[in-house]
Amino acid sequence: MKKILMTIVVLGAFSAAAFAADYGSAGCGLGSLVFKKNDMTQVLAATTNGTFWSQTFGITFGTSGCNAQGMVKVSMARESFIEANYKDLSRDAAQGKGEYVANLAKLYGYTPDNSYQFAELLQKNHTTIFAANSAKTAVTEINRLVASI
């Protein structure tokens, strides 16, 4: 129960970081500049961001309403989640599935449609990620693996 509560808090912090940066659930990018915050237009904003790669470009270069402040919060949410759920995450990663892997995949921006790729990445590299029995090492290794994709 304690771990599930921690998961909810971390995911809540992740979504709060997005809204605190003055953009909706679609995130920063051209779409969030063109479409204002309401449930229906967030779909259009996310589609625009994905189609034109404006979110990736904006995050990389700090344009389109994207800034490093939101990314720092996301990074801290990921690290906190891994530290709080290290043993359960290791178990789920070894199996290549599970609620801890699914929740971490969300923090890394994977959707339900492609989160299996994240699960496979963790399973294939389980020994490297969890060999040191250190949450800090796991964070570093997961970040390295995700960045190399």
Image (cartoon, helix red, strand yellow):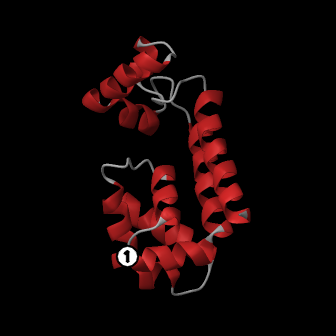
Q: Based on the displayed image, in which of its 4 quarters is residue 15 positioned? A: top right
Q: Quadrant of the C terminus?
A: bottom left
Image coords of residue 124 (percent x, y)? 33, 77
Tell me what residue is drawn at x 51 percent, y 24 percent: 65
Tell me what residue is drawn at x 54 percent, y 24 percent: 23
Q: In this view of the protein, can residue 18 be seen by the observer? A: yes
Image coords of residue 28 (percent x, y)? 47, 28
| 90, above or below 6, in the image | below
Q: Amino acid at mark 1?
A: Gln
Number of residue marks: 1
Q: Residue furthest front?
A: 1
Tell me what residue is drawn at x 37 percent, y 62 percent: 118
Image coords of residue 100 (percent x, y)? 53, 64
- Which residue has dot 1 on it? 123
Q: Nearer the viewer, residue 25 or 32?
A: 25
Q: Residue furthest right?
A: 2
Instruction: Identify the secondary structure beneath mark 1.
Output: helix
Q: Based on the displayed image, in which of its 4 quarters is residue 89 positioned? A: bottom right
Mark 1 Cα-neighbour bin, 10 Å: few <14, some 14–19, many ≥20: many
Q: Nearer the viewer, residue 122 or 5?
A: 5
Tell me what residue is drawn at x 56 percent, y 86 percent: 132
Asked if residue 122 lies left or right of residue 88, the reply is left
